[in-house]
Every structure is written in structure tokens, then in C-alpha cells.
Image (cartoon, rainbow, N blue to C red):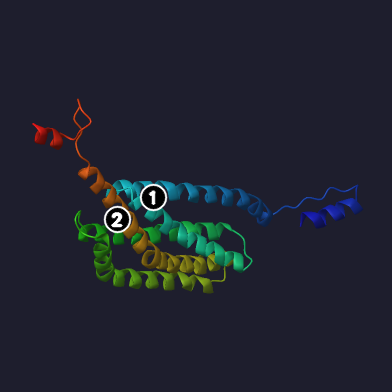
């Protein structure tokens, strides 16, 4: 639009041509709002992952929740790129809402896994039990939410159409992340955490006056 206006201005140097109207003002302000929301979404990832890790008192939960939370946003962004559509105000809001809804399912799964697990139990067992107990509910609620949001794609308003179908795609991607990414990731991280804790508990105590372990001092005595 500006290139066309610049050509008209060049042909008529004695006139001043400016674009006005609600649509023009909205278009100019939308760029700043989209950039602000994009930065806020990035900060939200970090804070939410940290809070989830603190809630479960586990360093393994935070990176797992962060990875699963980012996946639906990346999947929805990839769909936008394939369709040749850039970020809009409605699409950024849809990603933020979908991130919150998908994270709710992730927290429910982690909570059930935490209740089914134990210090001396393989994390894979707790993950499988959580999948059996809460997996059907997650699948059903995700499809219900996705179908409900997808109905907005029949709206006459373009912004609502984008919000509807993009939110549905992000919700389905969040379910895929919970079932295919969260399960192996949290199992691997929990096993690493248990192995590290076991090595710390098995480390021999050191005597303050000798390099030999305390057990060897007692045997020599």
C-alpha cells in the first residue's frame, strides 16, 4: 500500500496524501500488539515451566513441561507458515489460549504420574499407569474442546475464523505432545534424577583427618 501511495505522491508532488480510517489505525497498532504478545508468550513459557517445577518439587518436571508447552505453538506456527499466513492478533491470542488449555492437561497427567510413582519404582511404571488412568479423559476432553473451537471457523468474521481453526490445531498438537513427547521425556529425566540421587546416597563418608573411608578406619582398628 505504501509503495503504491509513494508512486502517486511522486506523480503529484503538490499534494499531500495520507491514509486514514479505522482499518488503517488498527493495522498500524496491530503490529505493535502482535510483537508485545509474542514476547509475552515467550516469557510465559519460562515462568510457567518454573512454577510447574516448583509445584512438583522436581527439576525434571520443568524442562519436560517447557518442551511439551512449546510443541503445540511450534506446530500451529508451522501450519500458518505452510498456509502462507503470518502472525495476526487473533492467531497470537489463539496460541496463548491453547497453551494454557494444553498445559492444564499436562499438569493433570503429571499429577497422576506423581501419585502413581515412588522413589523405588521405575518411572516408566508410573507413566504407564497414568496413561491408562487419565489418558482416555485427556483424549476425550481435547477432542471436545477442539471441536468446539473449530466451530468458530464458520464465523463470518475473519479474526474469529483464524482463532477457531488455529486453536483447534494447537489443542490437537498439545494432545500429541502429551502422549508422544511428555511420556518418554519425563521417564528419561526422572531416571536420570533417581540415578543421580542414588549415587549421592551411596557415596562413602569421608573422615576429616584421613583420606580413607570411615568404614576402613574401623576395620583397621
16 relative position to 184: left or right: right
30 relative position to 216: left or right: right
Residue in the picture at 26% in, 60% down: 123
Image quadrant in which you'd find residue 89: bottom right
Question: Is 212 above or below relative to 115?
Answer: above
Q: Which mark is residue 156?
A: none
Tell me the quadrant of the picture where the N terminus can be found.
bottom right
In this rendered view, identify the residue nearer to me: 104 or 9.
104
Image quadrant in which you'd find residue 184: bottom left
Tally of marks: 2
Secondary-structure class at tag 2 = helix
Say which residue label 2 marks.
Answer: 191
Question: Is 42 above or below relative to 102?
Answer: above
Q: Residues within 10 Å of mark 2 (few under 14, many from 20)?
A: some
Residue in the picture at 38% in, 58% down: 103
Q: Position of residue 58 (x, y in %)?
A: 29, 48
First in residue order: circle 1 vs circle 2: 1
Question: From the viewer's perspective, is the residue at label 1 or at label 2 nearer?
Answer: 2
Residue in the picture at 30% in, 62% down: 109
Q: Position of residue 56 (x, y in %)?
A: 28, 50
Say which residue label 1 marks.
Answer: 49
114 relative position to 94: left or right: left
Q: Position of residue 71 (x, y in %)?
A: 46, 60
In this rendered view, identify the residue nearer to me: 186 or 136.
186
In space, the residues marked 1 and 2 are separated at their CA atoms by 19 Å
Q: Position of residue 161 (x, y in %)?
A: 54, 68
Q: Which residue is outermost to the top?
A: 209
Q: Residues within 10 Å of mark 1 (few under 14, many from 20)?
A: many
Amino acid at each position: 500500500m505504501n509503495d503504491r501511495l509513494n508512486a502517486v505522491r511522486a506523480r503529484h508532488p503538490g499534494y499531500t496524501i495520507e491514509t486514514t480510517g479505522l482499518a488503517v489505525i488498527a493495522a498500524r497498532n496491530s503490529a505493535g500488539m502482535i510483537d508485545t504478545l509474542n514476547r509475552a508468550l515467550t516469557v510465559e513459557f519460562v515462568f510457567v515451566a518454573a512454577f510447574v517445577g516448583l509445584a512438583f518439587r522436581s527439576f525434571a518436571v520443568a524442562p519436560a513441561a517447557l518442551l511439551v508447552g512449546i510443541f503445540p505453538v511450534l506446530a500451529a506456527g508451522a501450519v500458518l507458515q505452510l498456509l502462507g499466513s503470518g502472525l495476526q492478533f487473533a492467531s497470537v491470542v489463539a496460541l496463548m489460549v491453547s497453551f494454557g488449555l494444553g498445559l492444564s492437561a499436562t499438569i493433570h497427567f503429571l499429577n497422576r504420574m506423581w501419585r502413581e510413582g515412588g522413589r523405588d519404582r521405575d518411572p516408566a511404571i508410573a507413566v504407564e499407569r497414568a496413561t491408562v488412568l487419565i489418558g482416555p479423559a485427556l483424549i476425550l476432553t481435547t477432542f471436545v474442546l477442539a471441536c468446539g473451537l473449530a466451530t468458530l471457523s464458520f464465523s463470518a468474521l475473519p479474526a474469529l475464523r483464524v482463532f477457531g481453526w488455529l486453536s483447534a490445531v494447537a489443542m490437537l498438537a498439545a494432545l500429541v505432545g502429551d502422549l508422544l513427547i511428555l511420556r518418554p521425556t519425563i521417564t528419561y529425566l526422572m531416571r536420570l534424577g533417581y540415578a543421580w540421587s542414588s549415587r549421592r546416597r551411596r557415596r562413602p563418608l569421608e573422615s576429616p583427618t584421613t583420606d580413607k573411608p570411615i568404614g576402613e578406619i574401623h576395620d583397621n582398628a
